[in-house]
Amino acid sequence: MKRLQKIGLILAIVILVGTFFIQPTELLPLAARNTLGLLLAVIVLLVTEVFPIGITCLLTITLMVLFNCAPGESGTTSVPSVLSGYTNATLFFVLASFGISETLTVLPLSKRLLLKLMRTFGKNINMLLFAIMLCVALLSSVISNVAAAAVFIPIINSFLDIYEDKDERKRTARSYMIALPIASMIGGMMTPAGSSINMLAISQLESLVPGLRVKFVDWMLFGIPLAAATLPLAWLFCVKIMKPAPISRDKIQRYINDVAVREPLGKKEIYVLVIVVAMIALWILSSWFPVFNVTVVALIGLALFFIPGFEILTWEKFRRCVSWEAFFLMGTMISFGGVIRASHLNEWIAQVVFPSSFGAPAFLAVALIAFVTFVLLIPIPVAPALVTMLAAPLVGFAQTAGISPYMLMITLGLIAANCYLLPLDTVPLMTFATGSYGMFDMPKVSGPIQVCLIVISAVWIPIATMLIGV
């Protein structure tokens, strides 16, 4: 066991044991006290990776029952009540999204898009980075951030081989590998399908505000302008702060020509393209025709990739491409959201985290929530856990302050999905593992981006909320 894991295990045990020495109060009743202690211990276990994520999640379900976090009419917590997250539609959308992502990455469709953008923008090393960031952002709007970023790591590594000077290669690698996960997460804001965090925020909001439905196109009205405004700024910070080493246009063109896909679109690529375009169209139509449920459409689309004759996926491939860690984390966090509400812990968190009264304009409320979310992502770099923890308290705060809970929950979802101040989230960890940059190189770029995102969100989200009329 590594030193950090030992510290994490000891700290989690201390928190769990220490919970029983805290006297319940009117604001923090027994069940809420137990839920708070368990929540803090689980966050420590996740951050320090004491156990594999899946095991931590299954252990959490068990501890919810043993700690009696959500007592029902009988006075005890039942196993079905804490497994409710595993019957949530969002979880099955996440499951389907892994298969959809796999089909778009195993075929050269993403490479064709990148080459098109590289030929358009690849005039110099800086504009080439913009082409890569734009491509990964576009892909990330409909597939997993992890998959979108992962497909470009080998492409960037092969491009870096054209540098003869090691220092110039390292300098450029630092800029490109920092930019890649940032662009992926920014692109993930564009549609509900772009990130599991988006779907989790929608699920939490709809369960907390009965009768409310977040339409696919409504989310796009928030996410696309935010991404469109933030991505060029992110690129600018990357090239100005990290300064990739310049290289001749001839070498860039030679590289593009070398990696070009010579074959025309094959039958399988056309088949996948038709299905994906149809899925996006149906997702958009779901805004007016609820029968085209986002999860149902995703599951049907996934099934079509298994049709014999046009078989893109096999069951073995699908099993391997699914991130079961993400599956268990999402299911457990959705369950935790229900437990937080059932135990009334949300009322205590609302008192501690959010002001008791708020008379400021809507744009300041959005700026406050965005700032608090980014700050909390530092000690809690597990976005699903943070969204789950803050959802109910945030809706309660919004209703008390006379602010639209829709507006603040959309803010929480969009901001939490941009977890890249430090390379601790899954997406930036992939590029950090390449050794291209240090832990504290990323904040030099990501810090200013997050500040800009707070300002842009404070301006646009209240306007978009008014346009939707919620």
Image (cartoon, helix red, strand yellow):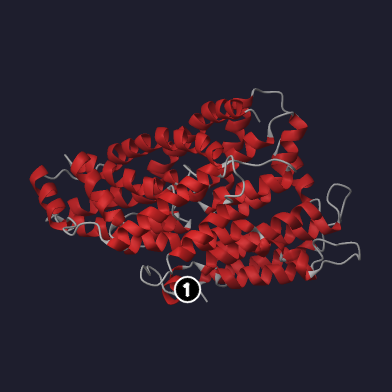
Residue that appears at 52% across and 28% down: 460
Q: Does residue 441 appear in this view?
A: no
Residue 162 in which image quadrant:
bottom left
Q: Nearer the viewer, residue 338 or 469?
A: 469
Relative to 401, is 104 above or below?
below
Q: Amino acid at mark 1?
A: Arg
User: Seen in the image, is 62 located left or right of residue 192?
Assistant: right
Give residue 35's position: percent from left, percent from top: 76, 59
- The residue that disc 1 covers is 319
Task: Say what secondary structure mark 1 lies in.
Answer: helix
Residue that appears at 68% across and 45% down: 206
Give residue 63's position: percent from left, percent from top: 73, 69
Give residue 128's position: percent from left, percent from top: 23, 44
Relative to 141, is 18 above or below?
below
Please, which residue is most extreme toward the right here? 74
Circle 1 Cα neighbour tier, 10 Å, few/some/many (<14 / 14–19 / ≥20): few
Give residue 91's position: percent from left, percent from top: 59, 60
Q: Quadrant of the C terminus?
A: top right
